[in-house]
């Protein structure tokens, strides 16, 4: 064992010489270090063998004050980014496809990528969706149900969220 309980250590201190005790302590420390190194190496091997996929997350796609932007971009930036992805032969896949790939149920090209539009802001429908449709790209939209038809206050700026009609329309697309 790499560790002694306090009582065992106390008895050893009384019966062993100081040199013998430290020899045992050093041996156990070396064993512990080897075990930790083995665990770290095992973790590294598993991490290297794990399947990975890129995910681009956007919160807002609009012209908001900088302090109100949380992982957001201007519509022109989204267009430029999609132009780049298309020109570099990235394959935009659904979140379901990515999950199947991660579970080993589906193969995907190396340059696969998922796009998510989070937050349920109105701009997801009015700004992001038309750009995505222009490129024939599907994205996963994450919508906070409690904010549907309301606004979210971010650093003093009220950002409108999608209405129920827009959410239903988005589901049909």
Image (cartoon, rainbow, N blue to C red):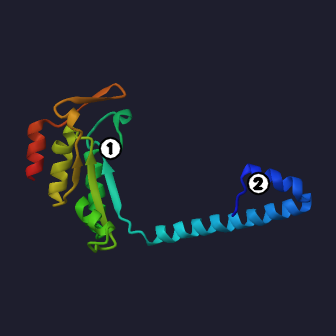
Q: Quadrant of the N terminus?
A: bottom right
In percent of the image, x 76 and y 50: which residue is there?
7
Disc 1 is placed on an element classified as loop
Number of residue marks: 2
Q: Earlier in the sequence, mark 1 or mark 2?
A: 2
Residue 9 percent across, percent down from the top left: 78, 53
Q: Nearer the viewer, mark 1 or mark 2?
A: 2
Q: Which quarter of the picture shows residue 169?
A: top left
Residue 70 percent across, percent down from the top left: 35, 40
Residue 119 percent across, percent down from the top left: 27, 41
In percent of the image, x 88 and y 63: which residue is there?
20
| In this view, 126 is above or below 172 | above
Q: Which residue is mark 1?
A: 72
In-image side of 89 versus 125 (left or right): right
| In this view, 57 is above or below 109 | above
Disc 2 is placed on an element classified as helix
Q: Residue furthest top?
A: 156
Q: Which residue is mark 2?
A: 8
Tell whether label 2 touches label 1 (CB within 8 Å).
no
Q: Which quarter of the picture shows residue 60?
A: top left
- Nearer the observer, 157 or 28: 28
| In this view, 76 is above or below 49 | above
């Amino acid at each position: 064992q790499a560790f002694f309980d306090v009582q065992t250590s106390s008895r050893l201190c009384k019966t062993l010489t100081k040199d013998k005790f430290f020899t045992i302590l050093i041996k156990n420390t070396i064993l512990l270090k080897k075990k930790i190194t083995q665990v770290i190496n095992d973790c590294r091997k598993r991490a290297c063998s794990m399947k990975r996929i890129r995910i681009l997350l956007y919160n807002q796609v609009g012209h908001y004050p900088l302090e109100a932007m949380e992982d957001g971009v201007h519509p022109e930036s989204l267009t430029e980014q999609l132009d780049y992805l298309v020109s570099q032969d990235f394959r935009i896949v659904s979140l379901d496809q990515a999950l199947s790939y991660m579970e080993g149920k589906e193969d995907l090209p190396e340059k696969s990528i998922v796009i998510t539009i989070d937050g349920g802001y109105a701009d997801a429908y009015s700004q992001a969706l038309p750009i995505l449709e222009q490129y024939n790209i599907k994205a996963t939209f994450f919508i906070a149900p409690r904010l549907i038809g309301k606004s979210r206050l971010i650093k003093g700026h009220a950002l409108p969220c999608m209405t129920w009609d827009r959410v239903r329309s988005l589901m049909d697309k």
